Image (spheres, rainbow, N blue to C red):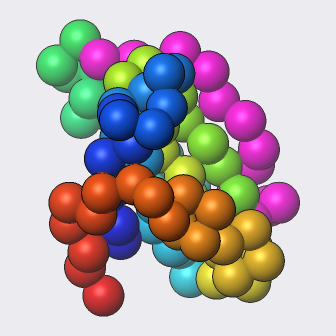
């Protein structure tokens, strides 16, 4: 998982969270946990793109955008390289 601060290079959000899931089921579980736990705090995604079966899901929470990828799609899209000027905040391997 990577947390990137994009606030100084993008006007549409402050942070990207980029994470990988090892299966469709795990990706759906991550989405469910985010929806449940953030929902309890009154935070709901504004938009959702993609599906777990496609290998990529974007959850737009306004200032924070969550990208969930299957490993193959994460390597293909290489978001971290595209946003190389962002400031890494957290990286968990």
Rendered image quadrant of residue 36: top left
Residue 67, how many percent across, how many down?
Answer: 55, 52
Q: Which residues are magenta?
A: 43-55
Q: Position of residue 91 (x, y in %)?
A: 26, 75
Quadrant of the image occupied by residue 8: top left
Residue 51 colored magenta? yes
The residue lying toward the viewer, choosing from 12 and 59, is 12
Tell me: residue 44, above or below residue 4. Answer: above
- Whether residue 60 is visible: yes
Query: Which residue corresponds to the image point at 28% horizontal and 63% vertical from the top-left?
Result: 88
Work out which quarter of the rendered image holds the C terminus and state it. Answer: bottom left
The quarter of the rendered structure image containing the N terminus is bottom left
Residue at position x 75%, y 48% in the image: 51
The answer to whether 93 appears left or right of 12 in the picture is: left
**Quick check: 47 left or right of 42?**
right
Q: Which residue extends farthest bottom?
A: 93
Taking depth in this image into account, of 56 and 86 the one nearest to the observer is 86
* Nearer to us in this view, 76 or 38: 76
Name the outermost residue toward the right: 54
Which residue lies at the image location 65% right of the left edge and 30% below the top edge? 48
- Residue 25 seen from this side: no
Q: Position of residue 7 (x, y in %)?
A: 35, 33
| 55 up-or-down from 29: above or below | below
Q: Which residue corresponds to the image point at 61% horizontal and 42% vertical from the top-left?
A: 58
x, y percent for residue 49? 73, 36
Relative to 61, 46 lies left or right: right
Instruction: From this view, report whether residue 51 is shown above or below residue 72.
Output: above
User: How many marks can you see?
Assistant: 0
Q: Is residue 70 above or below residue 29?
A: below
């Amino acid at each position: 998982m990577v947390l990137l601060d994009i606030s100084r290079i993008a006007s549409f959000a402050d942070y990207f969270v980029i994470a990988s899931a090892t299966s469709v089921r795990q990706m759906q579980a991550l989405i469910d946990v985010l929806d449940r736990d953030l929902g309890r705090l009154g935070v709901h995604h504004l938009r959702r793109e993609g599906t777990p079966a496609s290998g990529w899901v974007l959850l737009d929470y306004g200032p924070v955008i969550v990208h969930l990828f299957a490993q193959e799609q994460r390597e293909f899209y290489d978001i971290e390289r595209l946003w190389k000027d962002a400031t890494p905040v957290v990286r968990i391997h």
